[in-house]
Image (spheres, helix red, strand yellow):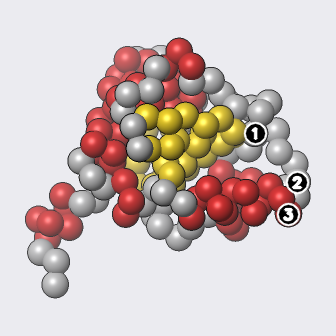
Amino acid sequence: MVNQAAREENSYNKTILANSVDATGEFAADFAKWLVLNGNLYQKNVVCLRGNLGAGKTTFVKAFANAIGIDPSIVKSPTYTYFRKYAVGDITVYHFDYYRIEDLNKRDIEEFLEIVDGNNLVLIEWPDRIEEYLPDDHFEVELEVVDENKRKISINEN
């Protein structure tokens, strides 16, 4: 049986009130370091980002990528390209954005499942469009706009 301390060390459930873009970035970086740099990545490799337009999903992804060694200037929202792929060391990061996707064809679904099932890190904006294809074990990042500069950000394991 796993003791409580070990279970807590290998889980990540946190909520913050971010008062700035920088605070959002720091929280994303903290999560990225815990997930990737501390060896927790392959327990769960999918991170779903939820929130309204302008909530900070892509900002979160940029800070996350920067924390693991990806130049944030090359990280862009894949809204019009479906996904973007980045590599750092032996890690391949896929950043999906399903905002503009109405219907997925069989090839798109198969490609998504192949990527998720591989040894890849997968960050997904607007995951509600593909809910039925998400693995049972994944992280949920909820970004809620409190006001123009504040965001409530929760990260939970699913």
**Amino acid under disc 2:** Asp
Q: How far apart are the alpha carbons under marks 3 and 1?
A: 15 Å
Quarter location, residue 68: top left
Q: How far apart are the alpha carbons under marks 1 and 2?
A: 12 Å
* Discs 3/2, front: 3
Residue in front for this viewpoint, 108 or 11: 108
Residue 60 position (above or below residue 11): above
Residue 30: percent from left, percent from top = 29, 35
Q: Residue 82 carries which label?
A: 1
Residue shown at 88%/58% (left/top)?
105
- Mark 3 touching mark 1, by CB under 8 A? no
Residue in front for this viewpoint, 134 or 105: 105
- Would you call the spot at circle 2 few (<14 residues within 10 Å), some (14-19), or many (20 or more)? few
On screen, residue 23 versus residue 151, left or right, reads left
Numbered disc 1: secondary structure = loop
Residue shown at 57%/29% (left/top)?
58
**Amino acid under disc 1:** Tyr
Residue 8: percent from left, percent from top = 20, 61
Q: Residue 103 carries which label?
A: 2
- Would you call the spot at circle 3 few (<14 residues within 10 Å), some (14-19), or many (20 or more)? few
- Would you call the spot at circle 1 few (<14 residues within 10 Å), some (14-19), or many (20 or more)? some
Residue shown at 29%/39% (left/top)?
33
The answer to whether residue 126 is visible is yes
Quarter location, residue 31: top left
Numbered disc 2: secondary structure = loop
Q: Earlier in the sequence, mark 3 or mark 1?
A: 1
